[in-house]
Amino acid sequence: MAGNIVEISDSTFGSEVLQADKPVLVDFWAPWCGPCKAIGPVMEELSKDYDGKVKFAKCNVDDNPVTPGNYGIRAIPTLILFKDGQQVDQIVGMADKSKLEATIKKGL
């Protein structure tokens, strides 16, 4: 992953997201998904804007089916904001920067 975005897996989800010391925005995606690719640059930009305040992560749903299943993800991209191990907010489908920022601010 580029920049400040970490790639997480079913095995690292707990330590990287649920036990994180700051809010985590997780992008559940797949390489074949057009809207997932389109949201990537927005995530990159936000990861720079909120560096040190929010952690940004991506989870490939094809390679890691357990975690998306645990959170009932049926469509991608789905972005979930976690804080203190709890789900704070969720966005399903393509979203613009302002909508993502509004979600992020719920965790700050």
Image (cartoon, rainbow, N blue to C red):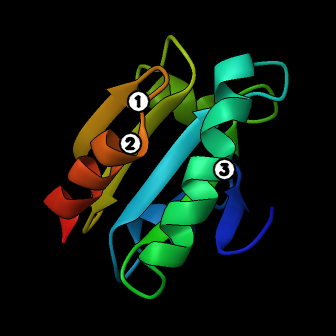
Q: Earlier in the sequence, mark 2 or mark 3?
A: 3
Q: Quadrant of residue 3?
A: bottom right
The reply to whether callout 1 and callout 2 are in contact (CB within 8 Å) is yes
3 to 80, vertically: above or below = below
Q: Is residue 24 above or below residue 98?
A: below
Residue 41 numbered mark, or none: 3
* Residue for point 63% across, 61% down: 44
Q: Image quadrant of residue 34?
A: top right
Q: Is residue 20 visible from the viewing direction of this image?
A: yes
Residue 80 percent location from the top left of the image: 38, 42
The total number of labels drawn is: 3
In the rendered view, does 9 fall on the left or right side of 84? right
Instruction: From the viewer's side, name the closer residue of 47 and 17.
Output: 47
Q: Where does label 1 land, which residue?
A: 71
Percent across and percent down for residue 87 are 26, 47
Q: Please identify, in this view, whether the residue under mark 1 or under mark 2 is nearer the observer.
A: 2
- Answer few, some or many: residues within 10 Å of disc 3's Cα (few below 14, many 20 plus, some between 14 and 19): few
10 Å crowding of disc 1: few (<14), some (14-19), many (20+) = few
List x then y, in percent, for residue 53: 36, 82
Q: Secondary structure at mark 1?
A: loop
Residue 59, located in which quarter of the rendered image?
A: top right
